[in-house]
Each structure stands twice: as structure tokens, then as C-alpha cells.
Amino acid sequence: LSAIAFRAKINPDDIYYEGIRNISKLDIEYARELGYTVKLLALARNTGTDLDIRVHPALIPKRHILANIGGVYNGILVRGGDFGDLTFSGLGAGALPAGSMIVSDIVEIIKNYDNYHNRYNFFKKKKIRDFSQTYSPYCLRIRVKDRPGVLAEIAGIFARKKVSFLSVIQKGEAGEVADIVFLTHQAKEGNVQESLKEVARLECVVKICNAIRVVEI
């Protein structure tokens, strides 16, 4: 889809991807409390100088139409400068729907092989942005020892990496450990990952539970 949309020659090996294996029930519940839904998204943007293409779980606003597409249905949002947003939805998951789409694609390629080959020759090689240079807000869930000063230690590390917080919520009853949920402003991917590595080394941190990007579509 990215190749067709941007008329670009794209190497799939250059695309960052991440699955849903680390998404837990708690992540889904906390996202819902914050007004979001967790979805596995494939994102493709033309920035003007390069292409920002990636696949990963993301929090999207519960009110958005894509948040309400589920089950065996998939959704595609196309955003254009002149026509605004167009959303398409249809069967795409499960054995029969997926199999039907694959067979349809194979038949289409066989019938129009020469046209596809000639069209692709006009596509240009375009740079895919290094994932560490992309920007996203984040929802971070960090399990810590429940004692004074922990939040200040964590916040200090993020501040030095130019990652600021939009909101902070402590979850769980008072006790030995607690989960702190941070919602950040937009930040550079590389800075967030460097911050998380430093935070994980703090004595007061039990575990980095998850770090999920937020997409405000």
C-alpha cells in the first residue's frame, strides 16, 4: 500500500515492526481509562523529505472510527490534503477472509503482470526514516517500589532526554510496589528508548512493564 500510495520502491526489510505479544490486559484497561483503545497499526506517512513507515501497537482515541473496528474486520484510513479523511473497512482476518484476499491478489497479479511490472519501473526509490528519528507521544507503565522520591528520580531522567509528561497516574493500593502510568508529549523515539534504559537501572524500579506509542488520528 505504501508503494502504491507514494509511488515508491520500498524494501520491506527497512520497515520497523513490532507485534502485540507484550500487550497485557492491564495495558488495555489503563488505555480505556485514559480514553484510548489499543490497536495494532501499520502507519505510512510522506513527510516531504522521507517516508515514515512502521508497524506497532498504538493507543488511538476511543471516539475514532478505527477504534471501533474489530473482530474479523480490518480498517484503512487514507488522509489527503484536499479530500480529508477516507475510511475503508472490510473482512480481512480469519482463515476464510484472509484466504479469499490472498487468492484475489494472486489472480490480479497473474492477469495484470505486465502492467504491474511496467508501472513499478516508474516508481522511485525513497528513503524510509530511521525509526529512532520518528516522533510519538507515549503511554509508559513502570512498576516501582512504593516510596517517596521515586517519581522525581524517574522524571529527572526523562527531562534530561527532553521527554516531558502530559499526565502521571499511580495505580494500585499503597503497599510495597505500585504501577505508575505516564502519558508523554510527543518525543523522539531514540530519546524515549534511551530514557527507559536508564530508568530500568534505577534501584527503585521493579520493571518497565510497557511502552506503547500514542497516535492522535
Image: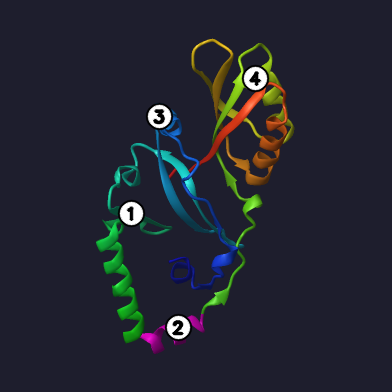
Element type where label 4 sits in the image: helix
Amino acid carrying mark 1 in the image: Gly
Q: Nearer the viewer, mark 3 or mark 2?
A: 3
Q: Say which quarter of the image contains residue 138.
A: top right
- Mark 4–mark 3 CB contact (< 8 Å): no
Which quadrant is the N terminus positioned in? bottom left
- Mark 1–mark 2 CB contact (< 8 Å): no
Residue positioned most to the right: 160
Pointer 2: what residue?
A: 119
**Left of 215 or right of it: where is 201?**
right
Sequence order check, earlier mark of 1 and 2: 1
Pointer 1: what residue?
A: 75
Label 3: how many Cα within 10 Å (few below 14, some 14–19, many 20+): few
Magenta segment: 112-122
Label 4: how many Cα within 10 Å (few below 14, some 14–19, many 20+): some
Question: Which label was assigned to residue 151?
Answer: 4
Alpha carbon separation for disc pair 3 and 2: 46 Å
Sequence order check, earlier mark of 3 and 2: 3
The residue lying toward the viewer, choosing from 162 and 30, is 30
Alpha carbon separation for disc pair 4 and 2: 55 Å
Residue 43 in view here: yes
Q: How many marks?
A: 4
Q: Residue 13: horizontal and vertical position, in percent?
A: 58, 66
Q: Residue 186: horizontal and vertical position, in percent?
A: 58, 39
Sequence order check, earlier mark of 4 and 2: 2
The reply to whether the magenta stretch includes residue 121 is: yes
The residue lying toward the viewer, choosing from 182 and 197, is 197
Q: Say which quarter of the image contains residue 119.
A: bottom left
Secondary structure mainly formed by the magenta segment: helix
Question: Which label was assigned to residue 29?
Answer: 3
Residue positioned most to the bottom: 114
Alpha carbon separation for disc pair 4 and 3: 22 Å
